[in-house]
Amino acid sequence: MGSYLRSGLILMTFALVVALVLSGVYLLTLDPIAQAELREKLAAIKTILSDDQGLMINESHVPQNMEELDQRIWRSSDDGILYESTEHRGSVASPVYAFDTLDGRKALLITASSIGYGGDVTIIASFLETEGSWQLYRIEILDFSQETPGLGAKISDQTIKSRFSEIPQSGLISGVLVDQDSSSSVGRSEAQIRNAKQRGIILTSDVMTGATITARAVANAINTMTQFLTSEGKVR
Amino acid sequence: MANSIQILKKGITENNPVLIQALGMCPALATTTSAINGLGMGVATMSVLVMSNVVISMIRKLVPAKIRIPIFIIIIAGFVTMIDLLMHGFTYELWKTLGIFIPLIVVNCVILGRAEAFASKNPVIPSILDGLGIGIGFLLVLTALGAVREVFGNGTVFGLTLWGDAFNVFVIILPPGAFITLGLMAGLLNWISISRQEAAKLKEKAKKEQTAKKEGQS
């Protein structure tokens, strides 16, 4: 009995010492982690608000810190979640930001997550309004840290992200699917890829072999965003 | 000094964790899709290995034999969490890419293996050298494996373009490519080792024959 108690006490002492050291490291890294995540978010926002010619918004409106970003809030909620979809196993995170483009269009930036291979895959997307119709313009992947390197983690490659860009409202309403989940096949030419997007079908099988689940998580996150925009009366 | 060098050298060559002992295969196969991923995972594992070896060697006389494994695991898990937090804050892109494999360093049998087989029985300095040797051996294999897979699968090395898409063999980037490349590397190391042993044997035989000849002449 005594030896069990002694062993338990020694084990507990070691666990306490390790926990104490870890709490110190946690406090030390708290600020650098928050800064790294903010830098990542600001860079992603700049990317999804740019087209091939450059920024679509006034340079001075690009947020450089948290305060400037907070000024762009369009919708927010106290619990951090604006919308949840059981159908797509996704959620829209608070807040959603709004920007005005140089050509007078409205841009909404929405962050959403859905379940990937190892955990949540989080994306941020820009939606552009053109004559009452909403188009998903560009996406950036904010978190794929639980996906397998070389397979699911390839979702952050530009070639793959660009496949999820410029999805018209018709595709969003149909529901976004990766081509492996669709019964109709998609050709490899630019025009065929664009046409498939009208029906919400995204070709990923040629650039993301063996990692359908991560691409499907991105599609589900986009579908959750569409449901959120529908609930807000934007996409009809 | 000679002994220290021997400990360090052993970890890299004759006790190489991946190519000889076939340990730590999961990160070796899964994370080495590029040279930078291999290097990052190698450095993270080596850091945990050296730090855990130091602490385990320091406390080796305080730890009751019955509960040594849970204590070693607590220490290793502590260092892995520390590395995870530091990479999250300071090497964000690499942290995102290596993802789930950083926390999984806890269950890398190379680390627990060295804690149990070496650090728990030896003083601090040899334990540091053992951790460094095995860690460098692990790092070199992972970086080489990542570089080979990146070159033949993607046409780049450390992100620098060599031949673009011209001669790419896509399967090398996929899991079967990891097994094929690792198998070839292990085969190459074995071939070098066998060739050296045979050369040494031939040298010794020639020496013996020369000595016998000399003795016959005298």
Image (spheres, helix red, strand yellow):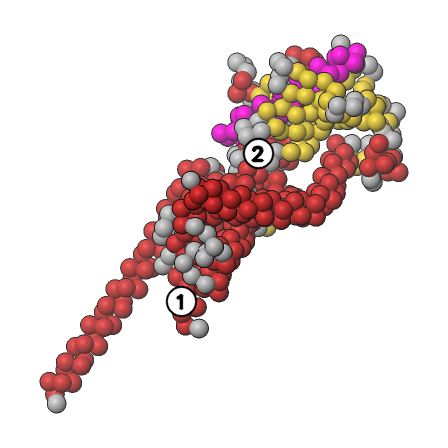
As drawn, B132 above or below A220 = below
Closest to the observer: B79 or B183? B79
For mark 1, name the chain.
B
The percent position of residue B198, horizontal first and vertical second, equals 25, 64
Quarter containing the N terminus of chain A? top left
Residue beneath the point at 56% across and 20% down: A179
Q: Can residue A195 be seen?
A: no
- Give left or right: position of A71 versus A181: right
Q: Which mark is residue A132?
A: none
The percent position of residue A69, horizontal first and vertical second, equals 83, 34
- Give left or right: position of A102 versus B179: right
Quarter containing the C terminus of chain A? top right
Q: Which mark is residue B6?
A: 1
Disc 1 element: helix
- Name the magenta segment's main secondary structure: helix
- Badge 2 crowding class, 10 Å Cα cut-off, few under 14, some 14 to 19, many 20 or more, is many
Residue beneath the point at 27% across and 67% down: B199
- Give left or right: position of A145 versus A231: left
Q: Amino acid at mark 2?
A: Gln
The percent position of residue A187, horizontal first and vertical second, equals 56, 22
- For residue A145, which quarter of the picture? top right
